[in-house]
Amino acid sequence: MERKAKGLKLADILTTIVIAIVFGVIYKVWGPLYDMVKVFGFHADQLMYGMWFIASSLAYLLIRKPGVALLAETAASSGELIMGSQWGLEVLIYGVIQGLFAELVFAAFRYRRFDVFVVSLSAVGATVGSLIMDFYKGYIDALAPWNMALFLLARFIGAIVIAGAFAVSLAKALEKTGVTQMWRPASQDDYDALNR
């Protein structure tokens, strides 16, 4: 019977950091794109906001261990900060809060589910974390009720599509390449399935 290690191994941490570095660069590039979309109004920029949650989703889907979502989101926001984020130190605080709220969703399912539903819920959790920070900063609570509803709807939809469905699709594509075998080597069940 295969014995599964519960804690993070060095390979898990290093892989999470590599994922985070890649997304730190993407986050840095995403900022100006996010600003460009603002000119369309109707909170179109919020449809893109989910990209800032994807590091936690993808890292969790690939590594599948406790703590990975928080580590990935914190490291990605740190990378964005180091590269000169337009939002300064605030980006790191957002990353920690968003990663924590995503991690809480995975913990609620005891780190046993890796489907679109759970990953989308983690994106919703990260969105809630980002909104707490936005309310703390005090700039969105001044929106009119209809405008606030549009703002929230767009951010939640963007999060579910990008950090939920897209993250799952990306993870499946990576699994097809065989790269995930480094973290999740073939089990006896996998070998038995080949002999059927």
Image: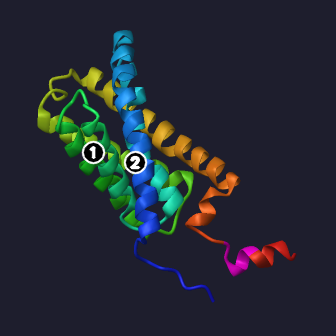
Q: Quadrant of the C terminus?
A: bottom right
Residues in magenta?
186-190
Query: Few, some or many C-alpha atoms within 10 Å of disc 1 (few <14, some 14-19, many ≥20)?
Result: many
In which quadrant of the rendered view does residue 139 lie?
top left
Q: Which residue is mark 2?
A: 20
Amino acid of disc 1:
Ser
Asked whether the viewer can see residue 29, the reply is yes
From mark 2 to mark 1, how far is it between C-alphas? 9 Å
Identify the residue shown where x is 25% and y is 31%: 84
Q: Earlier in the sequence, mark 2 or mark 1?
A: 2
Q: Is residue 193 a member of the stretch shown in magenta?
A: no
Residue 78's label in the rendered image is 1
Image coordinates for residue 67, horizontal then vertical, percent: 36, 64
Amino acid of disc 2:
Ala
Above-or-below relation of 140 to 97: above
Is 17 positioned to the left or the right of 191 in the image?
Answer: left
Is 61 positioned to the left or the right of 43 in the image?
Answer: right
Image coordinates for residue 138, horizontal then vertical, percent: 12, 31
Is 192 positioned to the left or the right of 111 in the image?
Answer: right
